Image (cartoon, rainbow, N blue to C red):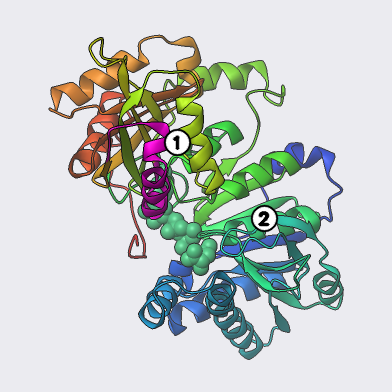
Amino acid sequence: MVNNDTSFQSTPLAHSCAKDRELVTNRIVAKFGGSSVADAESIKRVAARIAQAQRSGKQVVIVISAMGDTTDDLMDLALQVSPQPRPRELDMLLTTGERQSAALLAMALNDLGVEALSYTGSQAGVITTNTHGDARILDITPRRVAESLEEGMVVIVAGFQGVSYDTKDVTTLGRGASDTTAVALASALGAEVCEIYTDVDGVFTADPRIAKGARKIDEITYEEMLEMAANGAKVLHLRCVEYARRENVAIHVRSSFTDKPGTIVRGSIEDGDLTAAEEQRMEQVLISGIAHDRSQSKITVQGVPDQIGKAARIFSLIAKNNINIDMIVQNISEVSTGATDITFTLPSEDTERAMSALKDAQEEIGFTGLLFDEQVGKISVIGVGMRSNPGVTAKFFEALADNEINIQMISTSEIRISVVVDIDQLNDAVRVAHSAFDLDADTEAIVYAGTGR
Ligand code: ADP
Ligand code: ASP
Ligand code: MG
């Protein structure tokens, strides 16, 4: 049974994080993910936890995700009806998932004697761009939310959605984006910390579903969390971390199944937020985590004439199709042909579009062939400590080599090294890298719920 004693308690750290924002003390913004509200019982369990927080005198705003795998199920249903549904209609459909859970949670709270109101993203003032499926938040005007709070209500906001400023249509903010709704509301409403309740105890040194020895991280900087999220650690939505960093909102990632403290995301390695002692402590920890991503594919453009402007042409075609590429490798050109191969990775769902755009331009660019490979995965080693330690790459690559894992592509940033490997070796790669950097804990990490889908 959940003990609520420390639920919703703010952390002392939050005060230093929120120094630039005007805070409304006693106001809480918390988000519960889909696995925390997968069925009726879970909704009642979460409601009891929220009721307790409200009775302790807090103003409570809850951002809620769709129940369990509802969003995936709605997506599957749409594809059964239409292979390429119009993005506007898809957003109309997908936003219903969060409306269901928001209304159900309000009902459960009402039955506990708590006055609660549910709002859609639009009603809560989440104003976005008009890019269906991947809209950006432009502004938050939570007037109704603030009024309801002043009236003593618990406010439930449907996550992952907003309304377009231009078209006034309903939009969604990208998969996993309820986290971003929560941080944006926390910022707009002056909450001192944004709590993200999920199915694990916090941010771990690797996905605990894969590395059983993964360790919970007590505190992590925005930059490291950005690298983790950008490279596949879906425990936090990438844009939520970007938003939190920009607006100086501390995030507390924790389990909705226990009352243990989780992971605090705060502080920057760049802006002097950290004390010298904190910097030193962080740099002593060589690696903070390992992230993995199985959502990318690889395209190779073969026999590209080694002439100025050819690579630019290839990547402007890709950009024109609104496709984000990640890693790029260009081989040295063959002396006999004066041609070279260019390989890049991109989101798997964009492979078909990229291949067809390139095929159409084959004659004009003059390359000889195209290959694609969906059987790839990316593993990234992330840590501030690697800035001052030259041995990290060698250690990482040796660990992979010792386990017969071939490296296909490599990319790096100041605090990250990523490689592409065969998808079948990805989980092993995560585990061996985790051990190589001495990250393994003595106890097994707990995953409380969810299907990992
Ligand atoms: P929610 O439904 O609460 O939004 P998500 O499924 O989006 O939850 O995110 C939580 C999941 O993220 C965990 O169950 C875990 O499998 C996965 N995950 C991946 N990398 C990490 C990591 N480094 N630390 C914690 N969880 C991770
Ligand atoms: N329900 C949405 C999804 O599954 C948003 C979220 O859960 O954050 O992507
Ligand atoms: Mg999530």
Q: Secondary structure at mark 1?
A: loop
Q: Magenta part of the protein: which range? A: 346-370
Of mark 1 and mark 2, the one earlier in the sequence is 2
Q: Measured from the top left, where is residue 320 in percent x and y?
A: 56, 45
Position of 217 compared to 246: left or right?
Answer: left
Which residue corresponds to mark 1?
326
Q: Measured from the top left, where is residue 417 in percent x and y?
A: 40, 25
The kind of residue on which mark 1 rests is Asp
Q: Is residue 61 above or below residue 206?
A: below
**Residue at x 87% of width, y 74% of height:** 147
Classify the position of the N terminus by image quarter.
Answer: bottom left
**Residue at x 36% of width, y 45% of height:** 359
Tell me which corner region of the image, top left, top right, bottom left or bottom right, holds residue 121.
bottom right
**Residue at x 42% of width, y 36% of height:** 364
Does the stretch in magenta take in 367?
yes
The kind of residue on which mark 2 rests is Arg
Classify the position of the C terminus by image quarter.
Answer: bottom left
Which residue corresponds to mark 2?
136
Does the stretch in magenta take in 384?
no
Mark 1: few/some/many CA within 10 Å (<14, 14-19, 20+): few
Q: Measured from the top left, where is residue 118 in percent x and y?
A: 69, 80
Q: Secondary structure at mark 2?
A: loop
